[in-house]
Amino acid sequence: MDEPSKVHPRLQLLIPVAEGLVQTFGKSCEVAIHDLRVPENSLVFVAGTVTSRKIGAPVTNIVLESLRKYGNSCQDLIGYKNVTKDGRILKSSTIFVRDDDEKIIGCLCINYNISELIVHKNHMEQFMAFGEKFKSCETSEFFASDITEVLENMIEQVISKAGAPASSMQKDEKIDVVLELDSKGVFLIKGAVDKVAAMLGVSRYTIYNYLEEGRSNRANNKLTD
């Protein structure tokens, strides 16, 4: 193929685009412009130094394979993975440029080195990972200024989980609430019995009865299992 006398005007128009992209995204970005009329020396402009190529470098194998397989019907290649000889990982895109007759004359190629981002991503994933015990459940820890607020939050959470307001609960439902609060350690706090009684609309003596009855039933169930 004869070498064209100059770079195609449509490719010339992309030079400020390439420069602007690299200035925007920094040293990890490289934008290359290829004149595919001369694939052996197709690189006519490059901004950035990610691949260390110079003007006159050849077209890449990816572009060649696409042209061979699809000809002028090539679709743009957006966001594919590249790995350099020294192990750096690039996110790349190749955008084909056509003339007035819809014939492919060149391409604009973006290569972004994401190696450092992947390292940071792995660090973030490790840092943000929850313990094995808590991966399959969501915990709500109450950070309060006084113990009354903690008690109220714990009681409200258990009542809400029961699915019915305290005023419409049956006795067995209230016993279940009291037992769950007991399992959460609520009654280790001084004054908790009175607070639970008030929020369930029963007397403090009823709470003691619920605890006794519930614990007894639970113990009997374990014996019969």
Image (tube, rainbow, N blue to C red):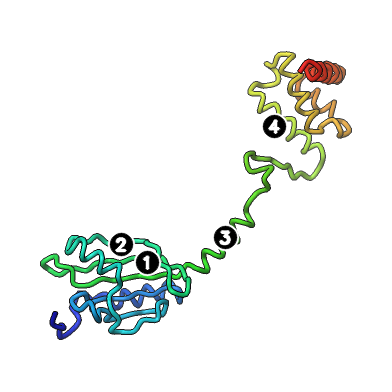
Q: Which of marks 3 and 4 is nearer the N terminus?
A: 3
Q: In this view, does 208 lie to the left or right of 84?
A: right
Mark 4, residue position: 157
Kindly state the secondary structure of the residue where label 4 is placed. Answer: helix
Q: In this view, does 150 lie to the left or right of 99?
A: right
Kindly state the secondary structure of the residue where label 2 is placed. Answer: strand
Q: Dot 2: within a 10 Å radius of its alpha carbon, few (fewer than 14), some, or many (20 or more) residues?
A: some
Mark 1, residue position: 92
What label does residue 77 carry, if any? 2
> Which sits in the foreground, 76 or 171?
76
Q: Which of marks 1 and 4 is nearer the N terminus?
A: 1
Q: How far is the residue under mark 1 from the one under mark 3? A: 21 Å
Q: Earlier in the sequence, mark 2 or mark 4?
A: 2
Q: Is residue 14 left or right of residue 29?
A: left
Q: Dot 3: within a 10 Å radius of its alpha carbon, few (fewer than 14), some, or many (20 or more) residues?
A: few
Q: How far is the residue under mark 3 from the one under mark 4? A: 35 Å
Q: Which of marks 3 and 2 is nearer the N terminus?
A: 2
Give percent across and percent down for residue 157: 69, 32
Give percent across and percent down for residue 37: 18, 76
Q: How far is the residue under mark 3 from the one under mark 2? A: 27 Å
Q: Is residue 80 left or right of residue 4?
A: right
Q: Are marks 2 and 1 in contact (CB under 8 Å)?
A: yes
> Which sits in the foreground, 203 or 42?
42
Q: Identify residue type, mark 2.
A: Leu
> Which sits in the foreground, 40 or 28?
40
Q: Can residue 206 be seen in this view?
A: no
Give percent across and percent down for residue 31: 35, 74
Q: Do the residues labelled 2 and 4 touch (CB within 8 Å)?
A: no
Q: Identify residue type, mark 3.
A: Asn
